[in-house]
Every structure is written in structure tokens, then in C-alpha cells.
Amino acid sequence: MRQAELSVVLITDHFRTIRRVIQRLQEQTARDRIEVVIVTPTERDLELDAQATSGFASVKVVEVGSISPMPPARAAGVRATTAPLIFLGETHSYAHPAFAATLIAAHDGPWDVVVPGLDNGNPDSALSWASFLPDYGTWHRALPPGELGGGPTWNVAYKREPLLALGDNLEHALSSGDELWSAFRAQGRKWYHAPDAPLEHVNVSRPRAWAHERYLAGVMVAANRNLRWSLPRRMAYVLASPLIAVVMLSRLRTPLRAVQSRQLPAGTIPALVAGVMLRTLGEAVGYIRGASREDESQMEDYELHKLKHTVHAD
């Protein structure tokens, strides 16, 4: 069996949670160059389907006792990899067949991080678009390839060495927010957008769950920034919250133009505005009081089991 060139790290409570993700990886043209690293509480409770995971360069199960909170589990997965490239996947992100091969080829360039061409995995929902565009619209697959000023923390492919070089800070860097982006930028790391590596991301679309998830997204970002931001800076952001919402909306003009050829669902723009306002409110609350363990647990449920928070039509 050939040496793995790309390790895909997945966090899950049970194999059924990632079955569809694994099926998409099975369809990869570079399947035999992929190492799948599954981080889970216990291998026994995972109930791994050996037949469904055949054909990869290797499959590794990493037992961590608990996958909550998620950042230490992600870090354990990263440290268990053996391939020179690492893709941090999610339970609700689905790769197209040429995805892995394109990421591997793109890393031949001088890039530390390659961001795939992200797309909405449940595009019939206005609420789904109102989550996807602020979170991932900057890296939509309709946008051109080229060097970037930064990228998301997961759903991207890293060279292994820069991640491991973070040392004891790796766990915090793999949390919500911009900690990893800031650390990599300070080190002069380079990002690249590879739209020819399509990845579909499913988003929360049940109204009540959607509003809660948008709010918690802001809370978690702020809570992680609190660890390195001074109190005066945090209070300045709280006071500037209305302007921050305007800035966030203005940044969505390019992603909106990228998807304008599509017939977006009715209500997408109002939902987009409401979602940005909810996230901004969450940030303000997070800067003031931080995040509770319940906030973190509920946000992790949205991340781990996102499909149960989508409407049936999706």
C-alpha cells in the first residue's frame, strides 16, 4: 500500500455520524493516498465499519475519552497524523471526487494552507445561505484561485509542520475565532484558494436552531479572543458593535456577486442581515462575560450533529 500524502482528520461520536463523509472520501480519485484519522471517545463505541473504510492508504482511530471540548480532540488528531498534509474535516462537509488530488497538487506551491472551493451543501434554504456566506462565502468555489490573506480554521488543508510547530498552543489555535490565522500571519505563512477542489458544507436551517447557532458563533469567537485581548480593546468592540455589523455585511458583497448567477431562495438577504446582527450581538455578550460551558456544549452539538438541525427538504 502506498504512503499517505493527505491525512483527513475527523471528530465523531459514532461512525454513522461520518458515514456520508467517508463515502465521499471513498469516491476520491486519490483515495489510496489518503490517511483517515478518526478521533472519538472510544473505538468500541465508534463501531467502525471496516468495509466502508477500505481502500485508503490507512485508517487510524484515536481514542480521547471525550471529544468535548473539541479543540483538544482536534489537536490529538493532528498529532496522530503521518502524512505531510493535513485536512481538518467536519461531519457535514462533503468532498467532490477530485478534491483530495487537487489539494495535494496545490500544496506543491509555496503555500502553508490551501483553502478548497467551498459551496453551500443545502442551497434551497435562505437560512442556510445566511450561515454559509458569512462563514465561508469568502472562499466560494466561484471565486478565482490565488493567494489569500487568511482562511478558516477547519475545512482547509495544512502542511503538517506549521501546525505541529504551534506546540502547546495548538489546542487553542484550533478553536473558534482567529487565533490560528493570527499566529500564522505573524509567522509569515501563506494561504492559497483552490476552487477546483470543491467541498460542500451543510448549514443549520431550522429557524430556532439557526438563530441560536448564529448567536453562539459570535459568543465563541469573542470568548476565544478574550484570552489574548485586553479589557479596553474588548469594550471598544462592544461599543462599536453596530459598526462592526455594517463592516461584516459590506464584506459579503463579493461573495454575493459570486453566487448571483444562482436563484437564491426568497428571503436570503433579510436572513443574512438578521444573521450578522445575531452574531454581532453574540460577540458583544462574549466580550463582556465570556462563554459558559453550556454555550460551548451547545455549539459543539451544532458542529457535530448539524444534519439534525436542517429542515427535511434540505
Image (cartoon, grey):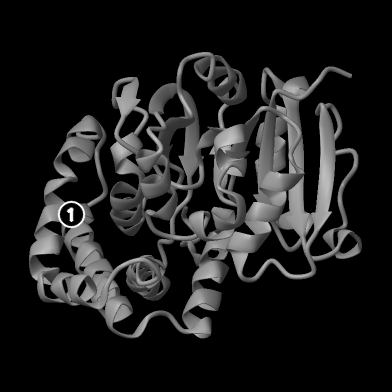
- Residue at 27% in and 72% down: 230
Q: Quadrant of residue 161?
A: top right
Residue that numbered label 1 is attached to: 248
- Residue at 36% in and 54% down: 128
Question: Could you tell me if residue 88 is visible in this image?
Answer: no
Number of other residues with Cα within 10 Å of mark 1, as a class: few under 14, some 14 to 19, many 20 or more: some
- Residue at 53% in and 83% down: 293
Does residue 50 appear left or right of residue 241 in this picture?
A: right
Question: Could you tell me if residue 311 is visible in this image?
Answer: yes
* Residue type, numbered disc 1: Met
Q: Is residue 92 above or below residue 4?
A: below
Task: Where is residue 203? Give x, y as percent.
Answer: 44, 55
Tell which of 118 and 284 is nearer to you: 284
| Image quadrant containing the N terminus | top right
- Residue at 75% in and 38% down: 36
Does residue 78 appear left or right of residue 179 in this picture?
A: right
Q: Is residue 278 above or below residue 182?
A: below
Q: Secondary structure at mark 1?
A: helix
Tell which of 306 and 244 is nearer to you: 244
Does residue 171 appear left or right of residue 279 in this picture?
A: right
Q: Is residue 79 above or below residue 105?
A: below
